[in-house]
Image (cartoon, rainbow, N blue to C red):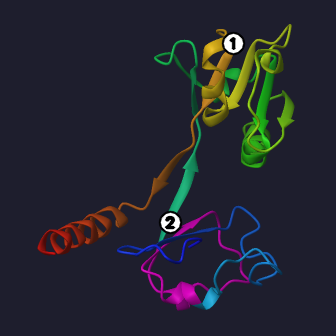
Amino acid sequence: MQYYRLERDIELTVVDFSEQSFGNGLLLPAGPLRRSLKFLGKSGIIVINGKQNHQTDTSKWGKTYNMKLINKIAYNVCNPESHQLISDFRNKHVHAVADADNSRWFFDFIQKTGLNAELHTYAENHRFIQQEIHFSGADIILMPEENALQCQDFADRKLWALPRKAWVNSELQPILLKKLRNNSVLQNQR
């Protein structure tokens, strides 16, 4: 909703209850919201991630669709066909590395999965160099996929990427496809 001048054929709003959600409930710059919460009742499609808190009444929003992030399998950056369950890293000496954009979800994930990892975080939008992902004695260096792919040119076999995948309620797909087809027909008629 950041770019109000863009034409909107389909509006999809994601409410992330796994984060701070609505903060203080105020609009920018006093709070984190770009639009009033009243807008949610008028939004085309609302997708909810995480468990909704009891302070938020979503019944006024209309139909909502659930989603959840699924992070169970990492792949080796030097050999992308090589996949490994994250749980297989539990008895390894792991270094988890992320920039500030990814560190919160990534380190929460590391903690929830029970990995005994040394955590390393860098500034937002950090451009990694080889020395920053070299740890003597490390069995595994695990990074969010977005960060790991920056390191492809100088990665060794210890570097593993964790992609962020989402499961979305299967009821949503036919609704989105129908809206896309309808918009495509309208575009062709112009």
- Residue occupying the point 37% across, 73% down: 10
Separation of marks 1 and 2 at Cα, in angstroms = 35 Å
Marker disc for residue 56? none
Badge 2 marks a residue whose secondary structure is strand
Q: Residues within 10 Å of mark 2 (few under 14, many from 20)?
A: some
Q: Amino acid at mark 1?
A: Lys
Going 86% across and 31% down the picture, which residue do you hit? 120
> What segment is highlighted magenta in the picture?
39-64
Say if 2 sits above or below 77 in the image: below
Could you say which quadrant of the image residue 142 lies in? Answer: top right
Q: Residue furthest left?
A: 189
Give amino acid for label 2. Asn
User: What x and y, as percent, mark residue 69?
Assistant: 57, 50
Residue assigned mark 2 = 66
Q: Is residue 44 magenta?
A: yes
Relative to residue 190, is residue 181 depicted above or below?
Answer: above
Q: Position of residue 78 (x, y in %)?
A: 57, 12
At horizontal 79% and vertical 75% (from top left) the residue drawn is 23
**Residue 103 image offset from top left, x and y in percent:** 77, 43
Q: Is residue 161 left or right of residue 172?
A: right
* Displayed quadrant of residue 122: top right
In this picture, residue 42 sits left or right of residue 77: left
Q: Nearer the viewer, residue 44 or 151?
A: 151
Residue ID for mark 1: 158
Quadrant in the picture for the N terminus: bottom right
Q: Residues within 10 Å of mark 1 (few under 14, many from 20)?
A: some
Q: Secondary structure at mark 1?
A: loop
Residue in the foreground of this view, choosing between 19 and 156: 156
Q: Is residue 106 above or below residue 77?
A: below
